[in-house]
Image (cartoon, rainbow, N blue to C red):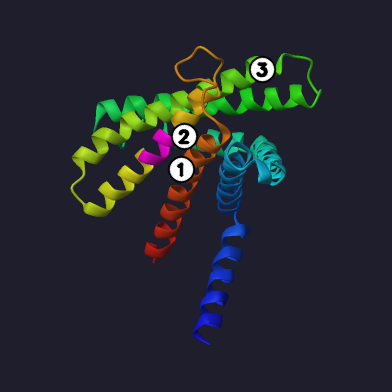
């Protein structure tokens, strides 16, 4: 009975997460990177299972494409958040305020660049998709870098243990994503293009699991 009760609770939690856009996105992201991790390992390390690995990599690619399409509708929400934050008048630290404003700007510019790249790949627009993918990835990487910079002083300033833990976990998640963002830039930029699929999957899985964990913790502490 206890096992059935636990299973029912887990299914209810999963169903609740899937009902929200953010929860669904986190789960799709986690599943996609896990498929890339396992698929990359099978293709590179287990020749006998390379066909399974290739299928997992294809599934990972399709899940990533799914998230790209869903992000076509994120611009308005991002604009509202950026407008509400404004110039960060509620922030005590001037450095954090400036970095956060620049980060919001990078996020706001990321979305239209990705939309144009997607539309070019879908042959809706006649432009070079590679340039727009590079630009969107650059804005994403810049946003992550600014996020890391803003969380470093926040972690030092805040004395409450739970807040420090949250900032550190977000910092680790951003670092993992930033490593992947650089990998997806054009060759010649730092370590761009040098990661094998399994390493991209590992970094993405770490980032995704940290995000899921933090979201779960936030829901558990919400009265």
62 in relation to 191, above or below = below
Residue with the most extreme front position: 48
Give, as a single range, the part of the protein colored magenta. Answer: 172-176
Closer to the chain start, of discs 1 and 2, is: 2
Measured Cα–Cα span from mark 3 to mark 1: 25 Å
Residue 213 among those drawn in magenta: no
**Label 2 sits on residue:** 177
Q: Position of residue 124 (x, y in %)?
A: 81, 24
Residue with the most extreme right position: 123
Does the CB distance between marks 1 and 2 fall below 8 Å? yes
Q: Residues within 10 Å of mark 3 (few under 14, many from 20)?
A: some
Q: In front here: 198 or 1?
A: 198
**Does 171 sit left or right of 54 as displayed?**
left
180 in relation to 47, above or below = above
Measuring 49% from the left and 46% from the top, which residue is drawn there?
Answer: 208
Which of the labelled discs sits on residue 130, or is there none? 3
Q: Quadrant of residue 68?
A: top right
Residue 105 at least partly seen = no
**Label 1 sits on residue:** 207
Measuring 59% from the left and 55% from the top, which residue is drawn there?
Answer: 20
**Does 19 sit left or right of 105 as displayed?**
right
Q: Position of residue 53 (x, y in %)?
A: 66, 43
Q: Quadrant of residue 94?
A: top left
Closer to the chain start, of discs 2 and 3, is: 3
Q: Position of residue 206 (x, y in %)?
A: 45, 45
């Amino acid at each position: 009975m206890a096992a059935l009760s636990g299973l029912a609770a887990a299914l209810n939690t999963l169903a609740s997460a899937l009902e929200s856009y953010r929860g669904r996105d986190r789960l799709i992201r986690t599943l996609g990177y896990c498929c890339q991790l396992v698929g990359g390992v099978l293709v590179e390390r287990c020749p006998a299972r390379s066909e399974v690995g290739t299928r997992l990599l294809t599934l990972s690619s399709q899940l990533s494409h799914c998230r790209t399409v869903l992000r076509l509708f994120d611009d308005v929400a991002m604009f509202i958040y950026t407008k509400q934050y404004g110039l960060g008048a509620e922030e005590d630290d001037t450095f954090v305020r400036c970095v956060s404003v620049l980060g919001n700007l990078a996020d706001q510019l990321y979305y239209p660049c990705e939309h144009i790249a997607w539309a070019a790949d879908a042959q809706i627009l006649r432009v070079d998709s590679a340039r727009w993918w590079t630009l969107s990835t650059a804005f994403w990487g810049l946003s992550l870098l600014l996020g890391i910079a803003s969380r470093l002083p926040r972690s030092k300033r805040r004395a409450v243990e739970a807040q420090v833990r949250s900032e550190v976990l977000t910092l680790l998640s951003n670092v993992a994503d930033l490593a992947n963002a650089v990998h997806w830039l054009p060759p010649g930029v730092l370590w761009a293009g040098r990661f094998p699929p399994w390493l991209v999957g590992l970094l993405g899985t770490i980032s995704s699991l940290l995000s899921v964990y933090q979201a779960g913790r936030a829901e558990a502490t919400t009265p």
